[in-house]
């Protein structure tokens, strides 16, 4: 049999994945992104970022093929067909009447066979490049031509043909319904259809539509079916035997491919919706070890999704870590985009580790062995005395676990204590992270931390000017400027020189 197992994991199996605490998904708003890209259906993939570069590149290939409109249309049709198959089989499972249950299954089988054969034919017309999709095509070739599948498909077609060849009459008189043998009588339903044809709009391309108001049968219909089955025992016996033999309709490999394919298609739909609002995505270069990290035109994807609903666009930012640089310390005025920048960094590294297109025009990312976040909680701010102890415990746990391949995102850590204590404790946190070799972002109000050493890069939330401190939400690589932030705070509270002078006049 052809060598195919998964279009998500390749031949590596479900490899060791990165340790990520559940709160990190909330801290980074990744839960919002995943909800918009398929939700819990893909949790088994979304919650298992990779540390294997080869598997990430394997997924990039699949995404790149499916980004082509013609290819994606073929796979969208397959997914729609499989959805119909599942609905047929679910409906079959709900039926109490055995004959009706078996017929729903038989119809589901027909949709299943047609869906696979249509995909098989279409794939041979497509210029597939992704290893995963090429291997799937080879597997599907062998599966559809195998004796087991052909026997299943042929037997189902024969049973269906036998049932559809049955003819009988129904005579309704008052409350009496009589099922009789067919002897060439006129088709009364055809007579009615012809009589009502003149009531249809001229040139109506839709033709007559038959609407089944409910899937199950009433008592009269059940009795009609039972009588027909009694008159044609051989055909209905074959239906029952076939249904028992092939109760598990969907092959396990096909079911897995269908689910994994939807991971790609759902994410691409999410991406394309944002691209229509001007957002840009790229396939990042990924490395197993630190070889520099950067993004050009990066942004918070969850925020971009929210803004797109109001037809607004997000501000983009860049960063770069090269050589000895390992940590970005982000300072600046409140509501200036610092926390958004930290989330952007975390989303970038996480989505890159899923093998997904990431927000930005170009990027390089190190795959980590662990993603750690520390965001100040609302209850921390409400209980400053106990909050510091809780913060220190959480930070201590992170610092004891990180390695040179870890990624750490600290957002307003130590903000519940005094400036002097925050500078002292924050300096020790920076020292521990730098000495570990981990890559980190530290969003803080303590400007001194940005001047710690060559391993630390200072990033500052920008404003228009000192005279007009309107936030730009651009995060710039430059030394911290505490006086500018003080001016922003003074202006907010009416404490500028001009404001005070105006009041005392």
Image: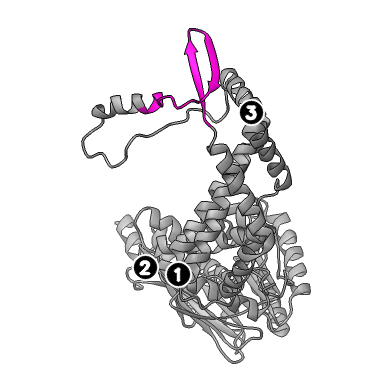
Name the spot of residue 7 as percent of width and height, x first: 61, 69
Q: Are marks 2 and 1 in contact (CB under 8 Å)?
A: no
The foreground one among 172 and 39 is 172
Q: Is residue 73 left or right of residue 353?
A: left
Give the distance between the C-alpha atoms of the residues marked 2 and 1, in whole angstroms: 42 Å
Distance CA(mark 3)–CA(mark 1)? 50 Å
* Rendered residue at 68%/69% (across/down): 5
Query: Please, which residue is most extreme toward the left here?
Result: 202
Q: Name the residue rendered at 49%, 16% in the picture.
A: 171
38, 66: nearer the viewer: 66
Q: Nearer the viewer, residue 295 or 466?
A: 295
Residue 93 lies in quadrant: top right
Which residues, given as a range, are shown in magenta? 167-190
Which numbered mark, 3 or 1, is in the foreground of this view?
Answer: 3
Disc 2: CA contacts within 10 A as few (<14), some (14-19) or many (>=20): some
Q: Can you identify the residue that label 3 sits on?
A: 229
What element does badge 2 sit on?
loop
Please state which of residues 407 and 179 is positioned toward the viewer in this rendering: 179
Give the residue at mark 2. 469
Q: Is residue 144 magenta?
A: no
Residue indicated by mark 1 = 67
Q: Is residue 280 above or below residue 163?
A: below
Residue drawn where x is 41% and y is 71% of the image: 280
Badge 1 marks a residue whose secondary structure is loop
Residue 375 appearing in the image = no
Counting residues from the N terminus, which is met first, the one under dot 3 or under dot 2? 3
Q: Quadrant of residue 232?
A: top right
């Amino acid at each position: 049999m052809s060598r195919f197992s998964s279009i998500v994991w390749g031949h590596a199996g479900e490899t060791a994945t990165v340790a990520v605490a559940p709160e990190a998904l909330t801290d980074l708003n990744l839960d919002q992104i995943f909800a918009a890209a398929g939700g819990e259906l893909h949790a088994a993939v979304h919650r298992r970022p990779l540390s294997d570069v080869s598997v990430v590149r394997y997924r990039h290939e699949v995404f790149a093929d499916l980004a082509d409109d013609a290819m994606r249309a073929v796979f969208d049709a397959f997914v729609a067909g499989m959805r119909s198959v599942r609905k047929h089989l679910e409906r079959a499972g709900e039926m109490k009447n055995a004959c009706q249950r078996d017929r729903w299954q038989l119809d589901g089988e027909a949709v299943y066979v047609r869906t696979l054969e249509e995909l098989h034919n279409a794939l041979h017309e497509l210029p597939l490049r992704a290893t995963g999709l090429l291997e799937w095509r080879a597997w599907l070739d062998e599966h559809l031509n195998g004796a087991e599948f052909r026997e299943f498909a042929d037997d189902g077609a024969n049973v269906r043909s036998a049932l559809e060849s049955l003819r009988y009459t129904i005579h309704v008189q008052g409350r009496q319904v009589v099922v009789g043998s067919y002897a060439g009588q006129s088709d009364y339903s055809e007579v009615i259809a012809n009589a009502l044809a003149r009531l249809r709009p001229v040139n109506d391309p839709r033709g007559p539509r038959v609407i089944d108001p409910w899937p199950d049968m009433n008592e009269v219909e059940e009795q009609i079916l039972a009588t027909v089955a009694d008159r044609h025992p051989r055909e209905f016996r074959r239906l029952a035997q076939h249904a028992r033999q092939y109760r598990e309709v969907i092959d396990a490999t096909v079911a897995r491919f269908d689910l994994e394919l939807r991971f790609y298609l759902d994410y691409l739909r999410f991406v394309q919706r944002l691209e229509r609002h001007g957002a840009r995505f790229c396939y990042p270069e990924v490395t197993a070890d630190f070889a520099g990290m950067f993004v050009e035109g990066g942004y918070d994807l969850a925020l971009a999704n929210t803004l797109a609903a109001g037809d607004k666009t997000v501000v983009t930012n860049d960063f770069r870590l090269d050589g000895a640089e390992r940590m970005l310390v982000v300072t600046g005025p409140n509501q200036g985009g610092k926390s958004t920048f930290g989330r952007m960094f975390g989303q970038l590294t996480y989505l890159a580790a899923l093998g997904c297109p990431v927000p930005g025009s170009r990027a390089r990312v190190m795959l980590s062995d662990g993603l750690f976040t520390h965001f100040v909680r609302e209850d921390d701010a409400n209980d400053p005395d106990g909050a510091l102890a809780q913060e220190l415990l959480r930070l201590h746990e992170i610092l004891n676990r990180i390695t040179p391949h870890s990624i750490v995102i600290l957002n307003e850590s130590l903000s519940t204590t005094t400036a002097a204590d925050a500078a002292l404790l924050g300096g020790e946190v920076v020292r521990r992270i730098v000495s570990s070799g981990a890559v980190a972002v530290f969003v803080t109000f303590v400007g001194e931390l940005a001047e710690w050493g060559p391993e630390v890069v200072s990033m500052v939330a920008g404003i228009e000017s000192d005279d007009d401190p309107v936030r730009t939400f651009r995060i710039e690589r430059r030394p911290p400027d505490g006086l500018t932030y003080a001016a922003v705070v003074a202006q907010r509270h009416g404490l500028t020189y001009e404001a005070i002078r105006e009041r005392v006049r």
